[in-house]
Image (cartoon, grey):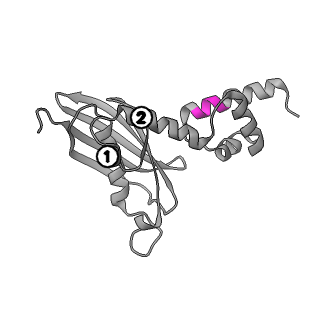
Amino acid sequence: MSTSGDRKRRHQRILKLLRENPLLTDEALANALGVSLSTVRLDRALLGIPEFRERMRKMAEEATSRLRSLRYDEVVGELVELQPNKLALSVLQTTGDMAFRDTDLVADHHIYAQATSLAIAVVEADYVITASAHIRYKVPARVGDMLVARAKVGTHKQNKYIVSVRTKVEGKEIFIGRFIVAALENYP
């Protein structure tokens, strides 16, 4: 039986975990906290936190309302967080049609496309292009993996921005990209 002090600490941990990673499922929260799935669901309800799909939908709506450099359908993956000229987050659920030949390995161009579209999306300008990229694939992604890409804007001079993108699967980093993106002025 849990005491009210235990429950309060668990609630604080849930809030902290979801601040760090708003894409955690109830199952992941239960594993992280060492409690049952029903306990997490009850705690989440008591805290007024919506379930995973609803949290993701709300985040996506808010993020896409800030999107300026791309149309929503041009972003590879689902944009779930956007703070223009600061950071962005997208998720991509991999499927069999993304596989390389007759394997369960996700073709690298899907991972790159998610990263470069996120690097462009994070810059607040009407027209943005990738000027250069330095990328490294650390571990292959597999069909069924959920790719979580996080972009962070570093320095910028004039119309050029340095954007780093890190892609993870279940917390393990699989891709790192450093992009220089340029905001085109007076275009078209």
Which secondary structure lies at badge 2? helix
Residue 15 on image: x %, y %? 63, 29
> x, y (%) of residue 160?
20, 34
- Please give left or right for residue 28 compared with residue 89 in the image: right
User: On the image, numbered disc 1 is attached to which residue?
Assistant: 117
Picture quadrant where residue 19 is located: top right
| Quadrant that contains the N terminus | top right
Q: Which kind of residue does numbered mark 1 sit on? A: Ser
Question: What percent of the width, then of the height, locates residue 171?
Answer: 53, 46
Query: In the picture shown, does residue 101 fall above or below 128?
Result: below
Q: Position of residue 178 (x, y in %)?
A: 30, 43
The correct choice, above or below, for 183 with respect to 174 in the image is above
Label 2 sits on residue: 63
Q: Which residues are magenta?
A: 14-18
The answer to whether residue 122 of the structure is visible from this angle is yes
Taking the spot 27% from the left edge, 42% from the top edge, the residue there is 179
**Tag 2: residue type?**
Ala
Of residue 36 and residue 179, the one placed in the foreground of this image is 36
